Every structure is written in structure tokens, then in C-alpha cells.
Image: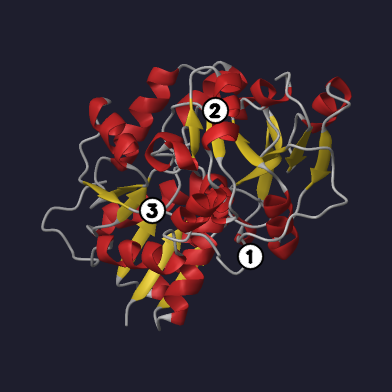
Amino acid sequence: MARILIATDAWHPQVNGVVRTLDMTARMLRQLGHTVEVVEPSLYPAVPVPFYPEIRISLPRPGRVYDRVRRFRPDSVHISTEGPIGLLVRRYCRLRGWRFSTSYHTRFPEYLWRLARFPEGLTYWFLRWFHGHSCPLMVATPSLEKELKSRGFRAPLRRWSRGVDLSVFRPRTKPLDTYPRPVLLYVGRISHEKNIEDFLRLPTAGTKVVVGDGPSRVELTRKYPKVVFLGYRQGQELGEVYSAADLFVFPSKTDTFGIVVIEALASGLPVAAYPATGPIDTITHEKLGALDDDLGRAVEQAQRTGDPAACAAEGQTYTWENCTQQFLRNLVPVTVRSTPHG
């Protein structure tokens, strides 16, 4: 059994796909008998991100992070995010001449441009540098792998998919006392970089339901009074919301995967989305939903051709067990190189 250190700037109480992936992977690794140390933000002082106060960024002293890594004595190190904790663990590994793996979860260049008009080219330069010595860089989908190669990422790329808790996300009998149908569901962060207004402004029949929270919730609740905003839901309660809906709408163009898409499939929901990274790798035929550059057309087609049974069968192929085995195969031992760099 191995001693595995995971460094991340995204952790509880954040609610997003990165945190869910890392939390479930750490749990599965421990169930398999591995010893896991997660170096995460709650261990250090933090301040809110200026243009996104719901997310706090940690400000650890380098010595505290270095000491935590040194005392754990890892066999493998995985650096999951490119923030302060990721940077410090990367720095420690480089100083020691250790090999490490990283993963690409978030399209920071596109997000920073939409939120703060920060130039994408500079952010991609930083990301190429950050991941440049990864052994390997883990990505969730073939389309993301192809894109990063085209953008000049030179680290070896390996696949690390995502999973679904099938005890939570599964088909259920549709309740009779629900909203006017069809019920179109969105689950995720309520923020402009998620492109959620493309969904909210669609002239569709039935009811639009939004699960989640974020900096744009108050504004959008006022702007779209007919939309049902439920706030956060977790566990079985979230699974029940999924299975009570008729269609899942995923308007994001900047996600690297979209765990909510496979949760919807496992719940028996067809998906309507743009043909972007994530959905383009998951919604592979018309029974699973529809992809279109016109989101309204995607919704109409997915309602016509989507097959709940086919969706559930596809969703059941995404398990956290398989996801964790992929992660394990991608890890590299902490082997000292002959010429360490700073």
C-alpha cells in the first residue's frame, strides 16, 4: 500500500466538481488500504477572492507546507490545483528532485477573462509552466487532451475520468405533485462564467429549476422570477431533484468535464448542451440528448430523442471505483532526479 499526498486549493466547504472528485478519490483510496494526506486550504489562513468572494484563497507560510509534506514522507505526490498550495508543493518537489503528477480541472484562462478581463494568453503561459514538469498531467476527456496539446502543453497526458455515486443518482418514479412539466433542470454554480443565462432566457414550456448558489444568484432571481431557485442540495435530496426532472440543461462552454452531466445521465435524464469540451465526449448519441450551437435547438431535440433508459445505462458506466483505479495507474513514485532544479 502507498502513502499518497494530494495537494489542492479547492476543498470543503466549496461545492463543485473538483472538490467532489478529490473527496471521493481520497475516500476510495483509503478504502483500498492506501494512506492519504490531503494538503488543503482549511489548514491555513485565507482571504476571499476579490471578484469572487464565495471562494477563499489560502495564504500559507511556505515552511508550514514544506514541513507537512516532509513529515508525511509520501510515496507519490499529486498536485491538483494551480493555486498557492499547489505552487508550494510543486516548489518543494522541484527542490527535492521529486517526480509528481498534476491534473487540469478548471479553465482558469477563460474564467479569468470573463470575470476580470485578465488576458487568456498570460494565464495559459502560467499553466504551461506550472504543468511543464508533471509526470503525468491528468485530464478527463479526449477533447481536453487534444486541446491542451494544441496549446503547447508538453507534459505527458493521461486520462482520469469521473464517477457517479449510483446509490444517489439513479432513476426514480416521477412525483405527481411537482412543477408544470416538462421540468428543465440546471445544477451547478450560479455565476456568469457558467453561461447560465443562456438557459434561463430560453422561451421553453414547463418549469426551469436551478440547484446551486453563487455570486449571481440574487441578480438572476430578480431577473427571472418564474425560475425556481432551490439553493444547494446534497446527497439523496439532490438525487431526488435530478430524477424528478425531465431534461438536464448544461449551458457551460468552459467546463473541462461536467460531473453534473453524468449525474443527470445516471438519474435517467437526457442532456441538452453546447458541443463543448465535456459534453462532446459524453453525449455521444441522440438517445443521451443533444448538442447544438443553438441551445434552444438542443433542448428541443433532446426532448424528442432522449431515452431515459439509455441515459441511465450510460451513467452507470461512470463509477468512482474505475475513476480511482485510473488515478492510481497514473501516479508516479517519488524518485529523486539526478539534477534537481529550483
Q: Can you identify the residue that label 3 sits on? A: 161
Q: Is mark 2 on a helix, strand or loop?
A: helix
Q: Distance between the residues labelled 3 and 2?
A: 27 Å
Q: Earlier in the sequence, mark 3 or mark 2?
A: 3
Q: In this view of the protein, can residue 36 be seen by the observer?
A: no
In this rendering, which labeled residue sits more in front, label 3 or label 2?
2
Whole-percent x, y for residue 196 in the image: 66, 27
Whole-percent x, y for residue 334 in the image: 24, 66
The relative height of residue 23 versus residue 62 in the rendered view (above or below) is below
Q: Which residue is drawn at 54% across and 28% down?
A: 301
Q: Residue at x 87, y 28 (%)?
A: 226
Give the amino acid at mark 2. Gln
Q: Distance between the residues labelled 3 and 1?
A: 19 Å
The relative height of residue 184 versus residue 44 in the rendered view (above or below) is above
Q: Determine which of the numbered discs, if any, sits on residue 168 in the image.
A: 1
Of residue 126 and residue 219, the one placed in the foreground of this image is: 219
User: Does the CB distance between marks 3 and 2 fall below 8 Å?
Assistant: no
In this rendering, which labeled residue sits more in front, label 2 or label 1?
2
Q: Is mark 1 on a helix, strand or loop?
A: loop
In this rendering, which labeled residue sits more in front, label 3 or label 1?
1
Position of the N terminus by quadrant: bottom left
Give the amino acid at mark 3. Ser
Q: How far apart are marks 2 and 1 (CA)?
A: 27 Å
Q: Residue at x 37, y 70 (%)?
A: 4
Of residue 13 and residue 222, the one placed in the foreground of this image is: 222
Q: Which of marks 3 and 1 is nearer the N terminus?
A: 3
Please tell me how crowded label 2 is: few (under 14), some (14-19), or many (20+) other residues with Cα within 10 Å.
some
The relative height of residue 139 versus residue 49 in the rendered view (above or below) is below
Residue 319: image quadrant is bottom left
Q: Determine which of the numbered discs, if any, sits on residue 301 in the image.
A: 2
Q: In this view of the protein, can residue 292 be seen by the observer?
A: yes
Please tell me how crowded label 1 is: few (under 14), some (14-19), or many (20+) other residues with Cα within 10 Å.
some
